[in-house]
């Protein structure tokens, strides 16, 4: 039997290899792919399942953020690979459950189950980067991973939009099950990055006390909250855009993917630029500038939407600028946050991920509570929380 705990020594040559980078990129893309691929099908799913399809995103995010808090200490105690194997197995089972669902309650349950495993991908990919690299190099590596992983949110809505033309939305979740199986197999080529001597020797229950220390760590929390507030805004677009583009503006579901993909192209370009910038400027300075630019575009979005000027063209343009800044914001804030607590990278990445992706719960609930049948609700949520992210970025101290 293969030993999943094998390869306990950190990778040297392999960590810079193409397979290592591709596998980590795929792990980080699990979340966006699990949600983005069926965005074009949400209106049809709502009709077929006779319920609010946006709740499938809410359920996924609830499971995603809670489960990370459990997997984090486990990965600090037993290493990174074992939780990944178990997590991807759960993801495959949950995807099959979604594909077989016949009502809204059933699919929400399986989306939560799916998230219990999906959360291990991005959380442990970040932790593995911190295991191997210094903060500047980690920021560069995270930007590299984001360039590659951006294929998922580009391809996801495009694939989903085309699939619902020729088959039902159930097939989308069967495809996710197949992708999860392929990723599970790929883990056999992924080295362990946390050696025995660097693992936490406290009990798993005792390791949960790390969360209190992390919440009390001002430096770590400033970067984490900066990213969290930004992602509340980002998820407001991800969750609200199907209604705005397809229902309100009448965009064909198969073309929705192109409007969504243009934002990810911007993210990829900015990520490529950020790989060079991190060696020239302090990460904190780059973070502030990126959040400031995102805030200006978010305010422009809110103002034009409130005045009902510009139509879909202005929405697409302002969201493009806002979303592109994620290429800097995610990489720099994550690298700085984990650098502040290097000895508990697994737990720190878990808490950061829980808050980051749990922020989508806030977005979906606000959209459901305050929806007025226009793009205004999505726009003001994006503007308010991007501004909050900017205020948090102003409080971080620049590390020389």
Image (cartoon, grey):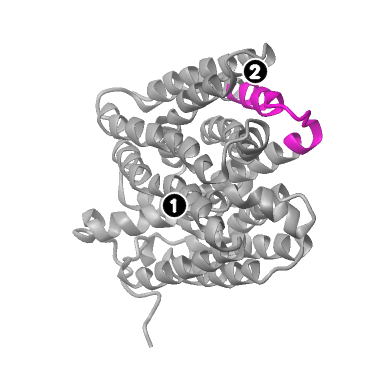
Residue in the image at 51% along x and 26% along y: 316
Name the residue at the left extreme: 13
Camera-nearest residue between 275 and 254: 254
Residue 346 in sight here: no
Q: Is residue 150 left or right of residue 11?
A: right
The residue labelled by disc 1 is 28
| Left or right, 212 with reference to 147 | right
Image x and y of residue 255, in percent: 50, 41
Q: Is residue 325 magenta?
A: no
- Please provide percent x and percent y for residue 113: 65, 65
Magenta-colored stretch includes residue 371: yes
Q: Nearer the viewer, residue 345 or 370?
A: 370
**What span is in magenta?**
366-386
Q: Residue furthest bottom?
A: 1
Q: Quadrant of residue 138?
A: top left
Q: Residue at x 45, y 56 (%)?
A: 124
Q: Which mark is residue 79?
A: none
Query: Does residue 3 show up?
Result: yes
Quarter holding the N terminus?
Answer: bottom left
Q: Is residue 138 above or below residue 297?
A: below
89, 162: nearer the viewer: 162
Residue at mark 2: 305
* Mark nearer the viewer, 1 or 2: 2
The secondary structure making up most of the magenta span is helix
Mark 1 or mark 2, which has the lower sequence index? 1
Disc 1 from disc 2: Cα separation: 33 Å
Residue visible at 67% across and 60% down in the picture = 112
Viewport quadrant of the C terminus: top left
Crowd class of label 2 (few under 14; some 14 to 19; many from 20; radius 10 Å): many
- Measuring from the top left, give residue 59's x and y in whole percent: 70, 54
């Amino acid at each position: 039997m293969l030993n999943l705990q094998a390869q306990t020594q950190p990778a040297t040559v392999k960590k810079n290899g193409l397979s290592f980078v591709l596998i980590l990129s795929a792990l980080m893309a699990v979340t966006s792919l699990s949600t983005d691929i069926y965005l074009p099908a949400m209106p049809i799913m709502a009709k077929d399942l006779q319920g609010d399809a946006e709740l499938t995103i809410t359920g996924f995010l609830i499971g995603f953020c809670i489960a990370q808090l459990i997997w984090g200490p486990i990965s600090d105690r037993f290493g990174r690979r074992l939780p990944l194997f178990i997590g991807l197995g759960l993801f495959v089972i949950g995807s099959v459950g979604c594909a077989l669902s016949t009502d809204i309650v059933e699919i929400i349950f399986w989306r939560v189950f799916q998230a219990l495993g999906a959360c291990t991908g991005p959380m442990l990919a970040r932790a593995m980067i911190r295991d191997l690299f210094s903060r500047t190099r980690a920021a560069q590596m995270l930007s590299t991973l984001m360039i590659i992983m951006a294929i998922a949110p580009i391809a996801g809505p495009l694939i989903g939009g085309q699939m619902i033309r020729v088959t039902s939305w159930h097939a989308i979740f069967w495809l996710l099950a197949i992708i999860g199986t392929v990723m599970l197999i790929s883990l056999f080529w992924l080295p362990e990055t946390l050696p025995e001597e660097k693992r936490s020797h406290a009990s798993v229950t005792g390791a949960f006390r790390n969360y209190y220390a992390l919440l009390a760590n001002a430096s770590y929390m400033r970067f984490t909250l900066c990213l969290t507030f930004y992602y509340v805004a980002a998820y407001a677009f991800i969750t609200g855009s199907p209604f705005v583009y397809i229902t309100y503006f009448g965009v064909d579901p198969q073309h929705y993917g192109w409007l969504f993909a243009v934002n990810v192209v911007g993210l990829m370009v900015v990520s490529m630029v950020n790989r060079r910038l991190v060696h020239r400027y302090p990460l904190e300075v780059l973070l502030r500038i990126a959040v400031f630019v995102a805030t200006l575009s978010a305010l422009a979005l809110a103002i034009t939407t409130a005045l009902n000027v510009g139509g879909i063209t202005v929405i697409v343009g302002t969201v493009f600028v806002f979303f592109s800044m994620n290429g800097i914001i995610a990489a720099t804030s994550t690298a700085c946050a984990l650098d502040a607590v290097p000895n508990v990278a697994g737990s720190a990445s878990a808490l950061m991920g829980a808050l980051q992706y749990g922020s989508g719960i806030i977005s979906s609930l606000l959209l459901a509570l305050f929806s007025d049948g226009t793009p205004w609700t999505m726009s003001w949520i994006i503007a308010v929380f991007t501004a909050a992210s900017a205020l948090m970025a102003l409080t971080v101290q620049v590390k020389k």
